[in-house]
Image: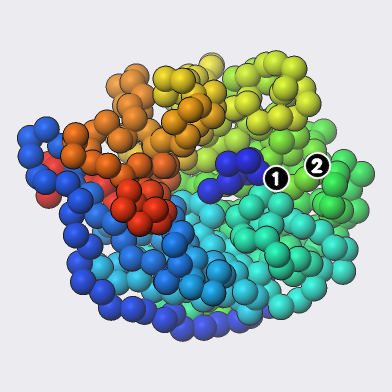
Amino acid sequence: MRPVSSAVLIAAVCGCSTETQLTQPRPLAQLTTSVPYTIAKLPSLGGTQSRGMAINTQGWVAGWSNRSDGTRHAALWRDGSISDLLTLGGPNSTVPWPGLNDAGMVVGISQTTAVDPLDEDWSCEAGSFLPGGTTNLICRGFVWQDDVLRELPPLGGHHSFAAGVNNLGQVVGWAETPVHDSTCTGVQVLQFRAVIWEPKKNRIKMRQLAPLPGDSASAATAINDQGEAVGISGDCDQAVGRFSARHAVRWDKNGKVTTIPNLGGTSWHTPMDINGQGDVVGFSNPPGPEDLAGDFIARAFLWSNGADTVVDLHTLPGDLFSEAFAINSLGQVVGVSFGGANGSHAFIYEQGVMTDLNDLFGPGNLDVFLSAQDINDAGQITGRVRDHVTGQVLTFVATPVSAN
């Protein structure tokens, strides 16, 4: 799960999306031999903040956008139009992970109108995935397809969280059980476990993915088309990474759990994505006194399927921390590097080199590309960019010149 400091880190309610027709987003950079990408900034739902979290093979983007009233809604961008995916009744919803498949199925989280009787913050608010100010509302994962928003049920507790979806329509995330767990801390009370949901026409199948033996909690963050899921295993803790992520793990298609190597610390070992070859990227704490205290000191990692160790991708120059968010079938990795004087910068890692995405957009670019959240097999990247004129933080799509 995403750390609080850098968070980008289900009853039956259906609704139709509200779509705004817009002109095709304009390119930001001139197409020259010195610029390997063309850039488009995408429209918002009326607010000044939005973020692309996932991009599929069609170039559709799922993510979130703030509205003019300050609420946040999950959004889908297609061919110059933005669709408001609405909510499960509460004020806010979002796509917090790369939760979009090639068929246009979108998964995410939403507040409901129901009040949590245990007064938990749960992962949705505790991880800053949804805006603060509205407390005690039960949060559920959702799946959106064909203009219908469906709620994803928990495991007998109150809350659920949907993170990833593959092209088979399998959805992964985590959900509360009814067990009062002694390893929970802060405002978290109930145990949670990783889940695979399979939404069918008239029902939603679900099965639990167990943690490693001896661990209390688990959460699944991504799943590939082979049905291999990755995620975390550890204590219940605060339901936002930290000691919930004592171990990075992978479940095979039958649900057997195994450990993924990490960078050597005790916490924040969090896979974020797995490609079709079984290669995994994410972030992990190295050893240190801050790690023992549960502080976030993580660096991006790449684990090649079957390797004995992970590769520390390090950071951009001058930064302290990094997170890898996505990997495509070509092994290209994208993410964010931060903790230095320059603030957050998007990166791409390929052929053993981490490159600041801002350095690839030509000398005429004055915008700041803050994070790269996903990359498809054509090399198209989405994330968030700060517009140098308006100061707004918007969703962008960077398309390689060779793909035009």
> Residue 171's x, y, as percent?
54, 58
Do labels 1 and 2 touch, CB within 8 Å? yes
On the image, which quarter does residue 154 sit in? bottom right
With 6 as the anchor, is 375 left or right in this view? left
Q: Is residue 2 above or below residue 26?
A: above
Q: Secondary structure at mark 2?
A: loop
Crowding near the residue tagged with mark 1, few <14, some 14–19, many ≥20 C-alpha atoms within 10 Å? many
Instruction: Identify the residue position indicated by label 1 in the image.
Output: 240
Foreground residue among 200 and 131: 131
With 143 as the anchor, is 183 left or right in this view? right
Q: Is residue 49 above or below residue 151?
A: above
Instruction: Identify the residue position indicated by label 2 in the image.
Output: 237
Label 2 is placed on what type of residue? Asp
Foreground residue among 11 and 46: 46
Question: In the image as oriented, which residue stretches furthest toward the front?
Answer: 389
The residue drawn where x is 34% and y is 30% is 356
Label 1 is placed on what type of residue? Val
Foreground residue among 393 and 330: 393
> Residue 228's x, y, as percent?
52, 43
With 39 as the anchor, is 94 left or right in this view? right
> Residue 217's x, y, as percent?
76, 44
| Placement of the N terminus among the 4 image quadrants | top right
